[in-house]
Image (tube, rainbow, N blue to C red):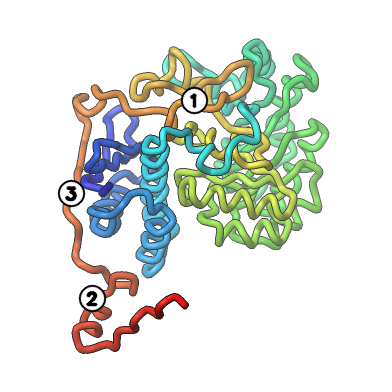
Amino acid sequence: MKITNISTINVEEIKQITWVQVETDIGITGLGETFFGPSAVSGCIHEIFSPILIGKNPLNIEKHWKNMFDMANAFGYAGAEFRAISAIDMALWDILGKFTKQPIYNLLGGMCRDKIRTYNTAGQYGENKDSELAITDAGTLAKSLLDEGITAMKWAFTDHFADQDRGNTISDEDLKLMIKPFEDIRTQVGNKMDIANDGHGRWNLNSAIRIGKAMDKFNLLWQEELIQPINIENHIILANEITAPVCVSERLISKFQFRDYIKAGAAEIVMPDLIWTGGITETKKISILAETEQRPIAPHDMTGPVNIFACANICMNVPNAFIMETCRAFNGEKGWYKKFVDPIPSIIDGYLIAPDIPGIGTNLKPEVLSLKGTKIITSNKPGEPHWGGFESPLFKVVNEKGRKKVKPKKNL
């Protein structure tokens, strides 16, 4: 089996999503996904990675991951390059699952569970107004989630305050307004609802500590990215100053960046974003790193449906999966997922259910490719040997100049 075509697909309605389809000469197609900077991602896929993948066996996933990483790392990997790697990696795993007729979690080592608890992040789409309710009537929002069996929720409760002074200060008056949604939730539903706060990295350390202490009385599930993950020592200070677990999150790219935070105890909850941090291959390894330090993982979402299926496969497999992020505004009968993929993620009574079909668990609907405004770019030719060592043109020259060949020893 060989890779014949790699396509990037972007639709007009959801501009930041890039879907990647990897086709093979036996008719199996793998699906991947990433989010943000679609032109940059597409450029990386078609200019850098497709030339070294076309014509190769798609089942050699570890080899391809390492080759792509080495190419990207020659010039700095943690950006569009890794979003591209993540999407391609997902598609290769999808091919492997379809080829073996197994869900990906079976290929990763089998199930630790057949469902995982989910929490709802308050996005909105169409008639859904969860984002607004999270600020204006959080208690009612919590009640509506509990009615669906969802017992945990998250929102960026601090963002609109940080925007006033780039997170450098927080006044007493604003701090009182900031914690009002938490008071509403606890008043209306008590402790039936777990609450997490996402700071989106907008605060300095002093403000983050002050905010964290003010929110500690509400017994939060975690504090996520109150400060940017650019300083391990400050995360340790924050963790020591507040009671809520510090969640270190989607801005960390690859096992190499996560390693230092996990080892230092700066990430009390580990939140890899599979479509940014290196795909299924890398997220499995990050999960193992977290397990060695007895830390749970809680994969990040709020992007597209294929990511949820990929994360579901990880969550069913790794022992230390804690909870999975989803957004009811995007999923379900009134969300946008159903316009583009079939099936959509299955969430029942607050749990994300294990995919039960071979591969990643879903496929793009055929009509997506012909939607007005859809942009499809396809690569179908292998490239010349690349700079970097593993296919270096210089290595070929050395061989042609008479490099001594080593004959294999005969078995005794």
Instruction: Determine whether label 2 and label 1 are within 8 Å by CB.
Output: no
Q: Position of residue 136 (x, y in %)?
A: 61, 20
Q: Is residue 65 left or right of residue 115?
A: left
Residue 58 lies, with reference to residue 347, above or below; the image says below
- Residue type for callout 3: Asn
Q: Nearer the viewer, mark 3 or mark 1?
A: 1
Q: Quadrant of residue 363?
A: top left
Q: Which residue is mark 1?
A: 356
Residue 176 seen anywhere in this rendered image of the structure: yes
Q: Nearer the viewer, residue 176 or 198?
A: 198
Q: Amino acid at mark 2?
A: Pro
User: Who is closer to the viewer here, 217 or 379?
Assistant: 379
Q: Which residue is mark 3?
A: 380
Mark nearer the viewer, 2 or 1: 1
Identified by mark 1, the residue type is Asp
Instruction: Say whether residue 280 is left or right of residue 407.
Output: right
Residue located beneath label 2 in the image: 393
